[in-house]
Amino acid sequence: MGTMMNTATYTGLPDPDYQSEFYADVPAKRALAWVFDTLIVVGLVLLLILLTVGIGFFFAGFLWLVVGFVYRVVTLANGSATLGMRLMSIEIRRHDGQRLDLGTAVMHTLGYTLSMSFVLPQIASIILMMTGDRGQGLTDLVLGTAAINRSARM
């Protein structure tokens, strides 16, 4: 059957076998980044509720969805990482090794939002992040993206 080729050659992402420093502790860092980002979104939603003199409370779920989506798209499109990811020194790279552009940031956020909306995809995503060579979640596998350590520059 021939020899197995290095997938990093085709994807532009670091090879997890030969460049494992790019993926070291990334799942744990992603979890901590998620907590930080969630706190930011909660703060922004509370601020909007206050600015609307409490009327926003009746639309809190919708505000959460919109603010979270916009926050994630804007931060991913402008640096390939949310503020939480930046704090944890990780960033998301496309299949070709480049940073996320606006379109990929929107698609990644849409995939993340859909995964978070249903229990089974979220559980599958967590399991994939914890067991895969590149620590990719479900959305990452679909898009060909991966979170890597920022300190280990490509």
Image: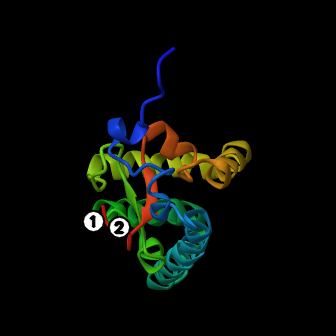
Amino acid at dot 2: Thr
What's the mark number on residue 148?
none
Q: How many residues crowd mark 1 within 10 Å: few (<14), some (14–19), many (20+)?
A: some
Kind of element beneath mark 2: helix
The foreground one among 80 and 27 is: 27
Residue 39 point in image, percent of width and height: 56, 79
Residue 83 point in image, percent of width and height: 42, 75
The answer to whether residue 84 is left or right of residue 34 is: left
What's the mark number on residue 75?
2
Say if 33 sits above or below 139 in the image: below
Residue 116 point in image, percent of width and height: 62, 53
Q: How is the image coloured?
A: rainbow
Q: Which residue is mark 1?
A: 78
Kind of element beneath mark 1: loop
The answer to whether residue 132 is left or right of residue 86 is: right
Rendered residue at 54%/73% (across/down): 33
Determine the CA span between mark 2 and mark 1: 5 Å
The C terminus sits in image quarter: bottom left
Q: How many residues crowd mark 2 within 10 Å: few (<14), some (14–19), many (20+)?
A: some
Residue 51 point in image, percent of width and height: 44, 84
Rendered residue at 68%/46% (across/down): 118
The foreground one among 57 and 152 is: 152
Residue farthest to the front?
A: 2
Say if 92 sits above or below 127 in the image: below
Please identify the quarter of the rendering in which residue 5 is found.
top left
Amino acid at dot 1: Asn
**CB atoms of marks 2 and 1 within 8 Å:** yes
Rendered residue at 45%/80% (across/down): 87
Rendered residue at 38%/42% (across/down): 8
Say if 16 sits above or below 153 in the image: above
The foreground one among 76 and 9 is: 9
